[in-house]
Image: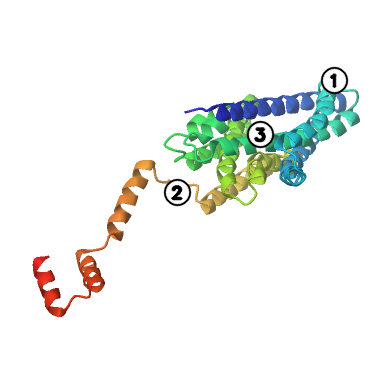
Amino acid sequence: MNLSKTKINALLALALFTFAFLAAEFRFDINIGLLAGAERVVLAQGFILGASVLGFIGYAPLLGLAQRKGHSLAAVNAAAVPIVIPGLAQIQFPTGPLTLEILGRIAFFGLGLLGAATHHAFSLAFQDGPKLATGAGATYAAGVVFDLAERRYMGLVMLGIAVLSTISILAVEAGADPNLGLVVFYLSSGFFVTFFTATFTQLAPRMHAPALWAGMGRAANNACAFTTSGISLALVTSGNVALIMIGALVLLVAACAAFVAAGLFRLPQTEQERKHQQLAEEALAAPTIEEQRQAFITDHALTPREVDVLVAVT
């Protein structure tokens, strides 16, 4: 990967954001569990992820407002930092469950703003780059896997990860070691995050509002976690194994249908295949000898006898 200073800075910013986000989420979950009980963790985590989605979505209009007032991108980032710091301090050193939840949501709203800015910068630096997924998954191995053959098999890899996740759920519910589910969960989470990030950062420069769409991959990932956390918790706590298995299979089928509709199972052309197709199209588009001869006759207003001579000569 040919890395310029701009790309290196974008990679470092994305890696730093990913580390800060995951570390803050981990510490928040641990402390909420200690202060409010394990049953509160999933719901509280859903709220902070929802707050981060609002930050990701709110970045673009804030950036537009700042630019209209003559401020730079750095001004938006600087405004988000004071929002984040008190919340992160509370997450690290909590004083009470209610304070932790309130300031935690504020902190993750600020992290959403910073994350959107980071993804926007990354999208601008790596647009049309052949190693986009590797950069997006700099903190995961998934990016390297996705970039094989110019991200040709990214959709198929995601199908495999989705099937593996479903199998692990079914296995755990059938009595397998719960650690199996944890291993698959942490393995697959990197693939999901990288898939969303790479897809939307590649799409963003072609959209009307690139600043909004660049971070929408992470926002979509968090939004899915936020909207499904309550349902997932209700299913797990119900103890109804049959219902859990049916729900997992229904979600897998729905995901496959969405992938088919989006065309992610169609193998895109490689660079060599695109060159061959371009040459073939150029050959088909080239005028035939008859078309060239007719154009010459028209341009030079040849007489019928001159046309006969031209045909005989050519």
Residue, x 91% and y 25% (percent of image)?
Answer: 96
Q: Above or below — where is 206 with respect to 144?
A: below
Judging depth in this view, the residue of 3 and 71 nearest the camera is 71
Q: Are marks 1 and 2 in contact (CB under 8 Å)?
A: no
Judging depth in this view, the residue of 114 and 259 nearest the camera is 114
Judging depth in this view, the residue of 85 and 102 nearest the camera is 85
Please give the residue where the numbered disc 3 appears in the rendered image: 118
Please give the residue where the numbered disc 2 appears in the rendered image: 266
Res 46 quadrant in image: top right
Q: CA distance from mark 1 to mark 2?
A: 49 Å
Q: Counting residues from the N terminus, which is met first, the one under dot 1 or under dot 2?
A: 1
Residue, x 13% and y 75% (percent of image)?
Answer: 306
Please give the residue where the numbered disc 1 appears in the rendered image: 93
Amino acid at dot 1: Phe
Residue 174 position, x and y percent, is 62, 34
Amino acid at dot 3: Thr
The answer to whether residue 192 is seen in the rendering is: no
Is label 3 or label 2 in front? 3
Q: Residue extending furthest top?
A: 93
Is label 1 or label 3 in front? 3
